[in-house]
Amino acid sequence: MSGKDKPELIINGKRTDGRDFNELRNIKIKAGVLSNADGSAYLEWGNNKVLVAVFGPKEAFPKHLSDDTKAVIKCNYAMAPFSSLSEHNRSGPNRRAVEISKVTREVFENVVMLNKFPGAEIDIFIEILQSDGGTRAAGITAAAVALANAGIPMKDLVYAVSAGRIGDKITLDFNMIEDNFSDSDMPVAVSPRNKEILLLQMDGGLTKEQFNQCISYIMDAGKTISAKQQEALAELYKQ
Amino acid sequence: MRKIVFPGTEIDRSINTEYSYTEFNKKYISVLSMYDSETNTIIPLEGFWHPNLGEKVVGVVVDYDRSKIYVELSSFVQGVIELPKHFDNPIKIDKGELVEATVSAIQSKVEVSLLFNKILDSDGIVIRMPVVKMPRVIGKNNTMISQIIEYTKSNIIVGMNGVIWLKGGNADLALKAFEEINKNAHIHGLTNKIKEMLTSSK
């Protein structure tokens, strides 16, 4: 798309949806929504709607993929055919879904205590029902809740959120239009216990100062997201 | 005071629990749990069965050969019953039958040796419960399970791998009691609550 067609993303010092530059969209999480899954979560993040189901640990299949020293994680990220306007109108895996499944799997391979279940597999299914930018971050945030709901031992409750740059303004949590037309976009997954970064991808470019600013926005936003995740899990055990 | 703790929450090092891990001399929770500050203990709210020696289990026979019977105990742990070498007391068994056994040795995280106790009638009722709720099913000094048996007169066998087999007596009432335990396993005074339920519907 040429520079001419780029829409105005900052109007009168505000973003297109009226948010501040370091403001998150509304997040709503509900845990344990699917009775057939071992763990599940439903998340609404702005206009994103994500459903995650976790199965396992169970016997790894096919057998040649199993590991005698630890469990293996299988992750499947899929966008429903009706999730966006037109681009994802065909269901089934595509290049983008395979990539996101891989990076999500690698996030959880670092926090799930896989050595407790040798020879087993853990399945994570992330289904995007409605998308509005930042679905991989929403998927990871919801999957962490679903894994905790399944009782799978983990080192931490991971969250993910994106930050980036519009012109020279550093901005948190892009929506679809900002995602498509921003100058730089960086989804990051963080382990809040020790602020370890488990996923970092980037489109466009950032200077060192801008990068640090992005990370500080993400760490601040993490407090809100973690609180929402914990609330959702605590809700199940209200006395 | 009880409060919910999440994976990654730091806890005091004096708390002894298997649902935690240590990193750089600090102890963190690994499974969604409840922390009880009066007893200084961690009660897991979700979790999986990790076999312990001497535990009674209930499982399904999935296969057998000349010397062994293979029993499925949970989604990733298999039990093996070694058949006796003499013919004094042969075990007649078929695939799909339910057996009660005791864990006699733990070979690995996925395989345990079992001592055969008995075959359970196939016309009994089998229910699966989350493993972390089994301590509540049994209760302190067996109080919970013995009061359920007392009031329902059912024949109940509790497998620590999360499988309960029951037959005869007031089975519906027993099922209702187990359902109640499953729903409210994390609250105080559950034994009295179940007792009330059992006496009122008798």
Image (cartoon, grey):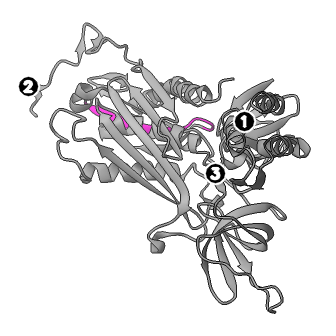
Residue A22, position in %: x, y? 41, 19
Marks 2/3 in contact by CB < 8 Å: the verdict is no
Chain under disc 2? A
Residue type pointed to by label 2: Lys
Residue A172, position in %: x, y? 39, 24
Spatial separation of the CA atoms under disc 1 and disc 2 = 62 Å
Question: In this rendering, which labeled residue sits more in front, label 1 or label 2?
Answer: 1
Q: Which residue in the protein does label 1 denote?
A: B185
**Image quarter in which the N terminus of chain A is found:** top left
Q: Which residue in the protein does label 3 denote?
A: B128
Chain under disc 3? B
- Is residue B45 within the magenta segment? no
Res. A34 visible in picture: yes
Residue type pointed to by label 3: Arg
Q: Which residue in the protein does label 2 denote?
A: A4
Residue B1, position in %: x, y? 81, 23
Chain under disc 1? B
Spatial separation of the CA atoms under disc 1 and disc 3 = 15 Å
Question: In this rendering, which labeled residue sits more in front, label 1 or label 3?
Answer: 3
